[in-house]
Amino acid sequence: MTNLTSLLVANRGEIAVRIFRTARDLGLATVAVHSDPDADALHVRAADAAVRLPGAAPADTYLRGDLIIKAALAAGADAVHPGYGFLSENADFARQVQDSGLTWIGPPPEAIEAMASKTRAKDLMRAAGVPLLDPVDPAAATPADLPLLLKAAAGGGGRGMRVVRDLDSLEEALHAASAEAASAFGDGEVFAEPYVERGRHVEVQILADAHGTVWALGTRDCSLQRRHQKVIEEAPAPGLPDTLRERLHTAAVAAARAVSYRGAGTVEFLVTADGRPYFLEMNTRLQVEHPVTEAVFGLDLVALQLRVAEGAALPASPPQPTGHAVEARLYAEDPAQDWRPQTGVLHTLDIPGRVRVDTGFTGGDTVGVHYDPMLAKVVAHAPTRAEAVRALAHALAGARIHGLTTNRELLVGSLRHPDFTAGRLDTGFYDRHLTTLTETAPDAGTAALAAALAAALAEAAPAPDASLAARLGGWRNLRSQPQTRRYSTAGSEYEVQYHPVDHPGVRVLSAERHLVTLEVDGIRRMFHVKRNSNNTEVYVDSPLGSHTLTPVPRFPDPQDRTEPGSLLAPMPGTVVRVAEGLTPGTAVTAGQPLLWLEAMKMEHRILAPASGTLTALHAVTGQQVEFGALLAVVQEEPLS
């Protein structure tokens, strides 16, 4: 048995905070590592000690295993937990940790290596009797093989993945997938397999010790995905027949035993509409969605990882599961704008209700460009699936999230969608429903107008420490004639005229700086109002929704205008590719991809806005660009 005393987490954000929480409960000292942008991050503040990794980019910081091991030794840590992402599935790093005399909180390096390449892993699983999809040779693909799914052999998280529906686009898709895989994982190998329409993504959590015990901790459904990355997960996977559930458990245990696995891991399957399971991959680490399994089994998987690493034996069988758990990933992104990630200051993050919130941020923290845009994981656990789904949707709907556009409304709409509530789940959910889920609600204008009125009343309310004379004088002045305020939100502008005690169709019950109570059509509603530190935005939260309002100045300054056809960077990022042969003077067509910009672990295409001629190209591969930077200019063809 090994007796651990101090733990370094080779990661950042919410997973580092979550691991530190368990380590602290177990009496372990904690050590964080951080890049320069993360110097004041929550995971640094949550640790007993922290070591700087000089630089900003992951390649210079969190992917530098040598620096992390040096940090662990310097801080007196005797164990390293990799979390997920970064070096968590890097066999060489695991060996280096062990060779340095540190305890590795993860599976044996040989198991990581065996599952590191999806192509080699499939060969292993075939030998172990685990069901597989037959691979397809892209060079010999025929129309009968379509649609195809291209996948990076060395990676995950949706990177290097493309769906191909016609042979004419296969070559370009292979090139793009390989380039993205090489950029993300240092390995451009890509393979192809049949793409299963309306398949379900179902996985089995496993936990194994060094004494021959392997637990299969139920199933999880992770079918709701955007860009092949999970958005909502739940345990157990709903609607699976007992025979299929048992088959998945048996296959997952067989996969673990085939590589002499130890610690926590996940075996992922694709389940067809007619109930046939196929092995996808094995993640040799803790998964993002592990909290739903913890909730239904009443376990702390990180604590069990640590005990297994110390040499402890698991009981012969796990505890019995109870109830249902659902997790939603809250991202700083705009689903209506091609899932565009958002950066900036997160002024408020407050999620009410009896839910678990795993996050790497608090109000006032900055969401930067270098890392994944996930703000938090929100988890609800209840006796039934319907209750868990309802509780999670209610908590998210009532959350106060200020400063950044997020996918919160999408999550609430997804959880309340008839297909989801009925358990009709598959990986094509957002392909079918994204437009409906992101369209403006019919009563959005009325709700925004009420929010604008509340913001104006809060602005006019006297400060809590104002004198009685100032309060009375203020109210008398306001009642003498209507006051006018204008706000803009979601591309629309609203003007409100008001007295503090009455308004057409609205009865003002109370108005304070941060809380306004209105009676609209006989229904009393409370509006929580908050301004950011420089008063450029007002955030209003109520049962009618959340609104970010921008005060409109009475005499706005003239706006600088860019040249027609200018392509501006939609976010800070790195230019990872320029279309082949693209130079000034090149003819382009509307919608043609011209540039590829990488930001926050996602790749974004910059498309030609119209057919015409490229008159300027300011971007080059490898260039770091700021938000709004001029990338290129397309002169539109004149109408004939």
Image: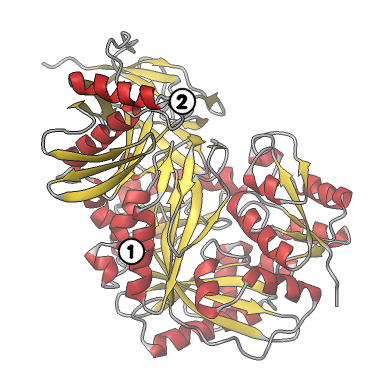
Q: Quadrant of the N terminus?
A: bottom right
Residue 504, above or below 418: above
> Pointer 2: residues within 10 angstroms few (<14), some, or many (20+)?
few
Q: Decide which of 349, 85 is in the foreground and name it.
A: 349
User: Any mark on residue 145, and which?
Assistant: 1
Residue 52, above or below 82: above
User: Any mark on residue 627, and which?
Assistant: 2
Name the quadrant containing residue 506.
Answer: top left
Residue type at tag 1: Asp
Q: Residue at the spot x=68%, y=88% of the render? A: 315
Residue 588 in sight here: no
Residue 243, above or below 98: below
What is the x, y in percent for residue 57?
64, 36
Mark 2 or mark 1: which comes first in sequence?
Answer: 1
Q: Residue at the spot x=52%, y=41% of the render? A: 600
In this picture, residue 500 sits left or right of residue 334:
left
Q: Residue at the spot x=55%, y=25% of the render? A: 623
Q: Decide which of 505, 24 is in the foreground and name it.
A: 505
Label 2 secondary element = loop
What is the x, y in percent for residue 629?
45, 20
Residue lying furthest front: 469
